[in-house]
Image: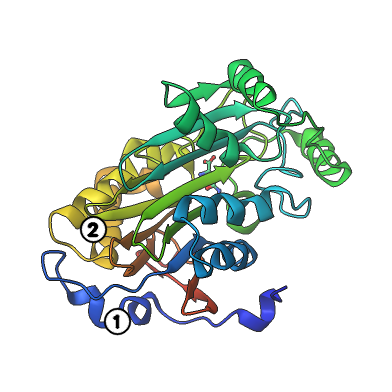
Amino acid sequence: MLSRKDFIKLTTAASVVGLAGKLQSKTPLKKKAPVVVSTWDFGLAANETAWKVLNSGGSSLDAIVAGVAVPESDPKVNTVGLGGFPDRDGRVTLDACIMDEQINCGSVACLEYIVHPAAVARLVMEKTPHVMLTGEGALRFALEQGFKKENLLTPQAEAAWKEWLKKAEYEPQPNWELNHDTIGMLALDQQSRLAGVCTTSGMAWKMHGRVGDSPIIGAGLYVDGEVGGATCSGLGEEMIRIAASHSVVEAMRSGKSAQAACEAVIKRYYKRRGDKAHGKQVCLLAMDNAGNVGAFSLMPGFVYSITCEGKHEVRKAKFLLDK
Ligand code: SD4
């Protein structure tokens, strides 16, 4: 098991991309597969599991579903799966989506009682004619597929909710570490198949029924094997507004590196939103179809986990604003 601290090496995003960051997508890129990246430092444990699958020749889809299952079932992670902070009614509702290089995709939103929404999203993709199931329908489908109904509200999350209820202030929280830790993961396997996943309990204390960016194809995640993939973390309402992940992939399609694409999308977002963006966080993570990675956020603090050639690292993304 990786110790978070042992592996935290903060370097700049520039060094992540290095020379590859300057390349245009039309230039043939040297393949770096397999590689896996995920949002935040708790992504390290998820990467470690995903890496085992990739390293033994498994598919990127199998790797990412196994990877994100780690934080989904970790009761100490209060932003994903079991132990996620509930909505203002005390209900833990989960959002997740998944996409492969052939633009197959599946999604679940506002799903209750199921620890692994990403695995359910995969089955929506593989076993139904639909892309997205929500609420009761998503739960019924999960149960039909053999998932077990469980109470996701841990005593610790329930205590935090009861504390919040004392004032019941509903504002986007500036403490991103507490409130915004969705895991988005992108992986390229040994056969250069790209896939991505995004899974979260969403914004803590949200209105019941609120759905963020994470289960929305094009907002929280987008993958196209012809180009690359992107995923997001931060305030979902802001990412939905700009179809963030799709925007990053399209910027890569037009010739930008993964890094330049993330930067261009954040800059455009800020230009359009101006003052309304202040106090909010938008974090983008991207990988092109050769395994070159980029990351950028609006505000400081965004870190991501990367595993390549068996080495696990946490890297610090560059950002646009200084507070
Ligand atoms: C949401 N984007 O539901 C998610 C929250 C998040 O890191 O990213 N947390 O808005």
Q: Which SS class for mark 1?
A: helix
Q: Can you tell me whether the CB of the residue at mark 2 lies under 8 Å from the nearest atom of ligand 1? A: no
Mark 1 neighbour class, 10 Å CA radius: few under 14, some 14 to 19, many 20 or more: some
Residue 300 position, x and y percent, is 47, 66
Three-letter amino acid code of the residue under disc 2: Ala
Q: Quadrant of residue 143?
A: top right
Residue nearer the viewer, 290 or 76: 290
| Cα–Cα gap, marks 2 and 1 | 18 Å
Residue nearer the viewer, 268 or 227: 227
Q: Which residue is at a point 35% across and 56% down the rendered structure image?
A: 193
In the figure, 12 relative to 305: above or below? below
Label drawn at residue 18: 1
Q: Earlier in the sequence, mark 2 or mark 1?
A: 1
Label drawn at residue 43: none
In the figure, 259 relative to 168: above or below? below
Task: Say whether residue 34 is visible.
Answer: yes
Task: Say whether residue 281 is visible.
Answer: no
Residue nearer the viewer, 235 or 286: 286
Q: Which residue is at a point 56% across and 35% down the rendered structure image?
A: 95
Q: In the image, is 185 to the left or to the right of 276?
A: right
Mark 2 vs 1: CB contact within 8 A: no
Residue 68 position, x and y percent, is 60, 52
Residue 252 position, x and y percent, is 21, 57
Rendered image coloring scheme? rainbow
- Residue to which mark 2 is pinned: 264
Q: Where the N terminus falls, by quadrant?
A: bottom right
Q: Which residue is at a point 76% across and 45% down the rendered structure image?
A: 83
Three-letter amino acid code of the residue under disc 1: Gly
In the figure, 142 relative to 258: above or below? above
